[in-house]
Amino acid sequence: MEVIINTIISEFSDFNDLSEFIIVVIRLLLAAVLGGLLGLEREQRGKAAGIRTHMLVCMGAALFIFIPQQTGISDAEMSRVIQGVIAGIGFLCAGTIITRKDEKGTSGLTTAAGVWLTAAIGIAVGLGREQTAVLCTLLAWVVLYVVPFFSGSISKKKSSSLGDDEDNTDI
């Protein structure tokens, strides 16, 4: 019985000390919060990839980076890990883009770009670049929340100058 208990204890001993555990908790919680902030806008607009999706993507990207980093892999190997995360997220993002046959064109591009950026933020968090991740999240928040006010007024001006006969659908 003692062998079983020791085996279980050794199997769950990823952390060398308390500080390493705290770093993991901080990074994963930060990734969840930053991803959730970006997903909030998509959720408010009724998009399928909302808060939970963005949180999971950000935490997953951070974890895919943090675990190899904990094992002490080389920079060249980390580069391959990052490439794999980017390719995997690209596949996920492609699934959010829908091309329509009608005059509405393409939808899901902003959601796909947001998920892609959320993964990049998760990578930054996983690498321990928390300040960069927070700054990027704030800039992305400006793009998602502030820019639509300006682009909406530009679109209204454009449609009024084109007249009713012109096709002015945005793709």
Image: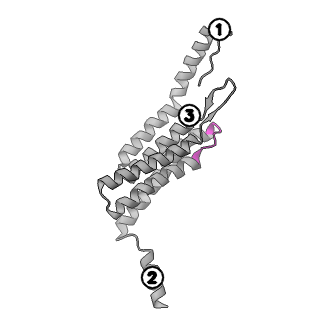
Question: What amino acid is labelled 3 in the image?
Answer: Leu
Q: With 152 as the anchor, is 130 left or right in this view?
A: left
Please report whichever mark, 2 or 3, sits nearer to the chain's N-terminal start: 2
Q: Which residue is mark 2?
A: 7
Spot occupied by residue 14 in the image (x, y as percentages of width and height): 40, 70
Please report whichever mark, 2 or 1, sits nearer to the chain's N-terminal start: 2
The residue positioned 49% from the left and 32% from the top of the image is: 143
Q: Nearer the viewer, residue 25 or 15?
A: 15
Q: Which residue is mark 1?
A: 163
Question: What amino acid is labelled 1 in the image?
Answer: Gly
In the displayed structure, would residue 125 be above or below residue 47?
A: below
Residues at marks 3 and 1, CA–CA distance in whole angstroms: 27 Å
Q: Nearer the viewer, residue 41 or 100?
A: 100
Question: What amino acid is labelled 2 in the image?
Answer: Thr
Spot occupied by residue 73 in the image (x, y as percentages of width and height): 32, 60
For disc 1, the neighbor class at 10 Å (few under 14, some 14 to 19, many from 20) is few
Residues at marks 2 and 1, CA–CA distance in whole angstroms: 75 Å
Q: With 50 as the anchor, is 131 left or right in this view?
A: left
Spot occupied by residue 77 in the image (x, y as percentages of width and height): 34, 55
Q: Which residue is mark 3?
A: 109
The residue positioned 42% from the left and 78% from the top of the image is: 10
Q: Is residue 64 magenta?
A: no
Find the magenta span and give its range. Answer: 44-51
Q: How many marks?
A: 3
Please report whichever mark, 3 or 1, sits nearer to the chain's N-terminal start: 3
Name the quadrant of the C terminus: top right
Residues at marks 2 and 3, CA–CA distance in whole angstroms: 48 Å
